[in-house]
Image (cartoon, rainbow, N blue to C red):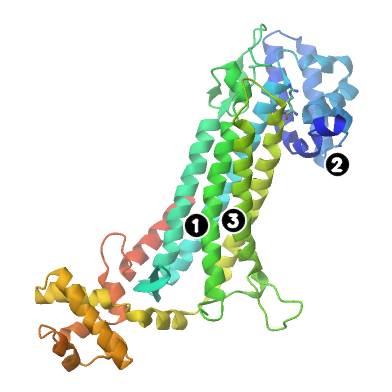
Amino acid sequence: MAEINASIPFDKRLWRQDIAGSKAHVAMLGRQGIIDAGAAARIAGGLAQVEAEYEGGGVPVDLALEDIHMTVETRLAAIVGPDAGRLHTARSRNDQVATDFRLWVRDAIDGHLAAIRTLAGVLAARALEHHATVMPGFTHLQVAQPVTLGHHLMAYVEMLKRDFGRFRDARARLNQCPLGAAALAGTGFPIDRAATAAALGFDAPTANSLDSVSDRDFAIEYLTSATQCALHLSRLAEEIILWASQPFGWVRLPDQWSTGSSIMPQKKNPDAAELVRGHSGRILGLMTGLMVTMKGLPLAYSKDMQDDKEPVFEAHDLLELSLAACAGMMETIAFVPGRMRASAASGFSTATDLADWLVREGGVPFREAHHITGRAVKAAEDAGVMLDGLSLQQLQAIDARISAGVFDVLSVEASVSSRRSLGGTAPERVKAAAEAAIAEVPQWA
Ligand code: ARG
């Protein structure tokens, strides 16, 4: 029973939040005259001592004490004597754990917000550096149109901005204090819930005592936000892995972010990126696990809910590492612009530019221009050259409306420079977007 029942091996991570909650609670009990001021002061002093002890030596794990709440209270009793028993007046472990866990998730979110800002700042800086570096843009992983590397990196800044917003929204919604809901029905003592909520940095007390002790939406919302962020990191990681592969050769990973092989001396493997990609699957699984744990529970508290903590702790640790690894890799990765440009020029990536030129300069309807361009691509393919490798005569044999001016748009540089539409890949656009992000990311709040 002790083994299946105990949560102290993992919920000891809540010790700071548990002591903070108890300090706020006991101060309120004293102010409200629910316990006498002397006892309240002695308990507060004892809690400060427990806090100092745990800070220095960690939290002792004794399965007989079940969880962090009983562990702290038992140590408090050893320090202050029978007065310790007054701390739990007008409180239950049900509202206590709900409060502790919200505080913990709030801190976890704050850590992620900072890490997302760091990664977005790194990506924006690399994007500025490479605002004019040409690479192929893909659809279906087939070369489609040239884009700039800066544009590609800024796409991830946009994803991270939304991830930031999701965590920020989750934080705003969770920031209500369940303390005072007691076991499930509230309490007959004249408590001041607004005071404990304010003392713990919550915006307000929660409104319904049953909901207060049975809600784990905040943990699930944390996990869904973490999952979405991890999925974005996984896509970035996948691109690092792909681009570092020899047939691509678009990036070189620095030694400090790669590993060797125990058998092949030439190998330099992108293990950190692979683990970021792998961790995203685990985080998704943890989210799913807690959702399934919660789905059939009748109101209010059931012990199943003790299983809410490990998935959140594990997801937190995995995401924190993933964000840090991505920032480290993106800061130090060496891009190989020559290889990227060569790939960008392959696959007739400026075919759309030829079609657009026919529309613009020749007054040809787009569908017809598309057809003419298809014939030009076929001719280039047969001749074994790029589109701009066809002579004017060869192009005019396909359509007489083509003139020498077409060569201004057929290079990859001309192609990216022409895409000046809002949100487009033109270097001037990318430069402005990266500069704006470098200024704004540190202000994300
Ligand atoms: N360790 C418990 C948990 O994490 C604390 C709440 C216990 N409540 C109870 N009614 N047994 O869920």
Crowd class of label 2 (few under 14; some 14 to 19; many from 20; radius 10 Å): few
CA separation in Å, label 1 and label 2: 37 Å
Q: Is residue 445 visible?
A: no
Q: Secondary structure at mark 1?
A: helix
Relative placement, left or right, of 54 versus 212 is right
The first of marks 1 and 3 along the sequence is: 1
Image position of 214 with respect to 356: above or below: above
Numbered disc in front, either 1 or 3: 3
Amino acid type indicated by mark 2: Gly
Q: Position of residue 79 (x, y in %)?
A: 88, 24
Image position of 392 with respect to 241: above or below: below
* Labelled disc at residue 442: none
Crowd class of label 3 (few under 14; some 14 to 19; many from 20; radius 10 Å): many
Amino acid type indicated by mark 1: Ala
The first of marks 1 and 2 along the sequence is: 2
Relative placement, left or right, of 57 versus 115 is right
- The residue identified by callout 1 is 120
- The residue identified by callout 3 is 323
CA separation in Å, label 2 and label 3: 29 Å
Q: Position of residue 275 (x, y in %)?
A: 64, 61
Q: Secondary structure at mark 2?
A: helix
* Labelled disc at residue 57: 2
Q: Position of residue 270 (x, y in %)?
A: 63, 70
Numbered disc in front, either 1 or 2: 1
Looking at this view, is 129 or 356 the one in front? 356
Residue placed at 39% from the left, 66% from the top? 151
Looking at this view, is 178 or 265 the one in front? 265
Ligand 1 contact, mark 2 (Cβ < 8 Å): no
CA separation in Å, label 1 and label 3: 10 Å
Relative placement, left or right, of 164 versus 151 is right
Q: Quadrant of ligand 1?
A: top right
| Image quadrant in which the N terminus is located | top right
